[in-house]
Image: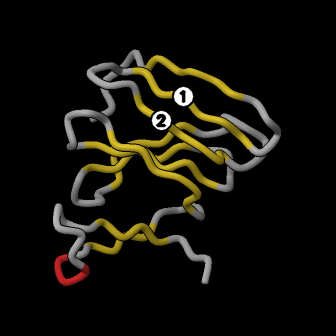
Amino acid sequence: MWNKQVIILDKSFSMMSAITKTIDANPICISWFSDGNIFCVGTCSGSINFLNKDGVFINKIDNLSSSWITSISTKSNSNELSYGDLNGNFTTLIIKQKII
């Protein structure tokens, strides 16, 4: 079933310690920043949500695409992220302000 939940597992991928968080749009893809403290979620509303490792909402970038964000990747030890959308566009962003 498609829903607005993100399930965060511990390092052993244990469902026993899983955290379930609801975000404001249906998640499509996820990528972690290299420090392991923040991850970003591409959504079907064309936005990217940023959450901390406990699933607490931090920030959001809206109106990136008129279609689904179908893939997202963060660059190691960097403030860059790249995403692709359902229309076949591929974009790289440099986050100039602190996410937290």
Left or right of 18, for residue 89: right
Q: Which mark is residue 35?
A: none
Compared to residue 32, the image places residue 15 above or below, namely below
Where is residue 15? Give x, y as percent: 25, 80
- Residue at horizontal 22%, vertical 59%? 54
Quadrant of the frame with the C terminus: top left
Left or right of 11, for residue 65: right
Q: Coloring scheme of the render?
A: secondary structure
Secondary element at image label 2? strand
Where is residue 83? Give x, y as percent: 59, 34
Residue denoted by label 2: 73
Tell me which label, 2 or 1, sits earlier in the chain: 2
Where is residue 32? Give x, y as percent: 34, 43
Residue type at the position of mark 2: Ser
Where is residue 9? Give x, y as percent: 26, 68
- Residue at horizontal 24%, vertical 75%? 18
Residue type at the position of mark 1: Ser
Left or right of 99, for residue 88: right
Left or right of 36, for residue 33: right
Quadrant of the frame with the N terminus: bottom right
- Residue at horizontal 53%, vertical 21%? 93
Instruction: Tell me, yes or no, whether the two marked residues, 2 and 1, touch with CB atoms within 8 Å.
Output: yes
Residue denoted by label 1: 82
- Residue at horizontal 40%, vertical 42%? 59
The front one of 33 and 24 is 33
**Badge 2: how crowded within 10 Å, few (<14), some, or many (20+)?**
many
**Badge 1: how crowded within 10 Å, few (<14), some, or many (20+)?**
some
